[in-house]
Amino acid sequence: MKEKVGKQSLKFENAPYIIGAASVAGPKEIDGPMARYFDRVSEDPTFGKDSWEEGESEMVRQAVMLAIQKAGVNKDDIRYVFAGDLLGQLIASTFGIKDMEIPVFGLYGACSTCGEALSLAAMTVAAGYADNVVAEASSHYGSAEKQFRFPLEYGNQRPLSATWTVTGSGAFVVSDRESEVCIKGITTGRIVDYGVKDSLNMGACMAPAAADVIYQNLQDFDIEPTYYDRIITGDLGKVGKKILTDLLKMNQVDISDNHMDCGIEIFDNEEQDTHSGGSGCGCSATVLAGYILKKVSSGEWKRVLFVPTGALLSTVSFNEGQTIPGVAHAVVIEHHEMSKGK
Amino acid sequence: MKEKVGKQSLKFENAPYIIGAASVAGPKEIDGPMARYFDRVSEDPTFGKDSWEEGESEMVRQAVMLAIQKAGVNKDDIRYVFAGDLLGQLIASTFGIKDMEIPVFGLYGACSTCGEALSLAAMTVAAGYADNVVAEASSHYGSAEKQFRFPLEYGNQRPLSATWTVTGSGAFVVSDRESEVCIKGITTGRIVDYGVKDSLNMGACMAPAAADVIYQNLQDFDIEPTYYDRIITGDLGKVGKKILTDLLKMNQVDISDNHMDCGIEIFDNEEQDTHSGGSGCGCSATVLAGYILKKVSSGEWKRVLFVPTGALLSTVSFNEGQTIPGVAHAVVIEHHEMSKGK
């Protein structure tokens, strides 16, 4: 039982590795500063299909297959897929992976799903239940706006606190085969509800959950924020970033020097009119697969805390006057020196 | 790595136990033959709240807290909750567990969610990642009809192949503490798509997935169907049951003597006008918690294969003309002779 650390964390004795990662993104992402790190981008938001939803499934399929290919394994070597998206009943994931014939665990953690998937994938491999598994998460601007807000044709105004859902999918092969990137541990988040009800200010909804899980990670592992080269949240955006750093400062934790938010990095928010930043499961998933893992693999960053954040609402809960609680899942990703020269 | 068995199964070396289970159900279920086995039933479909959705969350909350109480542990002893429901973005689970302050993994496997939750819960405890975790799943007739089909006020006709969504929640404390019920292993399902598109014939959508995972379980563990006292599907109903047994017979597997379906058992289908049977995550979850586990605990049934089945659709995927694939997750639940008299 040595894996259990503190109240909410696990430290893996046999830390699993990420041996392949792939990112596929859409047209808006092409104009953002992260585009050059992505494996594939498409000018066509339906990715050659008939609808946004089918396009999102096609992204899922491409990202998973490409991650498997880049890992140098076969589809039949993958024992489980852990996958999720933002759409009701996970239809993007379902239709993206249904023909792969791989046992599947469907996950929903809103935009924290990439962290949830990586956590369960790492737990599964570290326990010896599988040699190779896939973790994947996706979102799509068109399908998400339709799911959560207004028809795009309506052209509603967006407040400056709003974020722009990323069209993208990130997939990862987690394995017991050594690589230069390992998952050392995880801190699993609780649902945190500060009573915020504004679905166009997701950063404010999610920041308390991010603060909670980051604080708990530092407590459980008995470390300072500077242990990490970067503490990287998923899609808090500019509004949420300020709330996060303020909340942690109130608890005598200062992450202002090494905090980064995928939602702020993925778009040029001034040029691209994306207001507070990018969001969606695909935001943190593509930035992790495309950008962060390259930095960790090269050793430029030795240790990062990856913390995707999710806002837990639906149109039904919103219209019935419920609050929008948040959740966040933290994954400790570290550079690993290969035991033999590679 | 001894846990891996065959292509899709795990056999736990340290098989975890179910030390507490609770079932909470609604007004229609009171008139069914399972009512006397449930811990709590309510004449009020909103469980004292303002909406079906809030009522479902209240069921979730009650079932989880009662399972913890019956297990004789404290809320603080629970390291993770694995939970899911049928509603978009899992709002029933979110608002049911949000105040418990327990780290959470949100799951979606449609009506197979109880099997998915028990699988991941068992994997987590068997690996030593936690002493006690909760697995939970729920559904609600009112919220599910609103989510997937027509407004109840519309009073649409229901074909005889249709099932009736169970209003119920089942919760389970999975633990390393010995009890008379243990989870010996799991077989995790793949998505199976036979191209069925009729959302009012869910049995036909799900039966192929059930056949696939049951067949694989028997192959992986190299056993005959008679190994189990019962092979228990979730909510195939009468239509799906026939398809399941026929499909397996085509593969020289005969489960007709020991197959049982929770959807057929939970209502008096003739008297209650529920057509093909009951359905929903809550169907298999409440029947497991209320009825099946008592039989296993007493030793009347030594071994059961619990196979909740899910139909993977949303109104969006349905309206866009997509098929309705199925998924099913099998859990091997066995009677355990206590090492010391209890």
Image: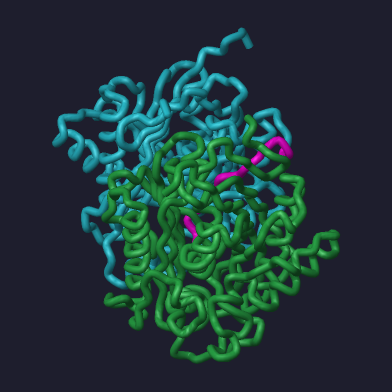
Chain colours: A cyan, B green
Side (left or right) of A17 relative to B59: right
Q: In the image shown, does B241 or A9 lie closer to the viewer?
A: B241
Between B36 and A88, which is closer to the camera in this rendering?
B36
Lateral position of residue A161 relative to residue B168, left or right: left
Place of residue B213 in the rendered image (x, y in percent of width and height, measured from the top left): 69, 55
Residue A82 painted magenta = yes
Image coords of residue A23 (percent x, y): 56, 38
| Quarter holding residue B87 | bottom left
Quadrant in which residue B198 is drawn:
bottom right
- Extreme top residue here? A341
Residue B318 located within the stretch drawn in magenta: no
Image location of residue B212, percent across then percent down: 73, 57
- Residue under the point 60% across and 44% down: A81
Q: In the picture provided, is A78 more to the left or to the right than B40?
A: right
Residue occupying the point 31% across, 72% down: A320
Q: Is residue A292 above or below residue B245?
A: above
**Nearest the camera: A52 or B89?**
B89
Q: Position of residue A188 (x, y in %)?
A: 38, 40
Classify the position of the N terminus of chain B by image quarter: top right
Left or right of residue B245: residue A87: left
| Residue placed furthest toward the front | B341
- Span colored in magenta: A75-88
Which quadrant of the figure has residue A95?
bottom right
Q: Is residue B224 visible?
A: yes
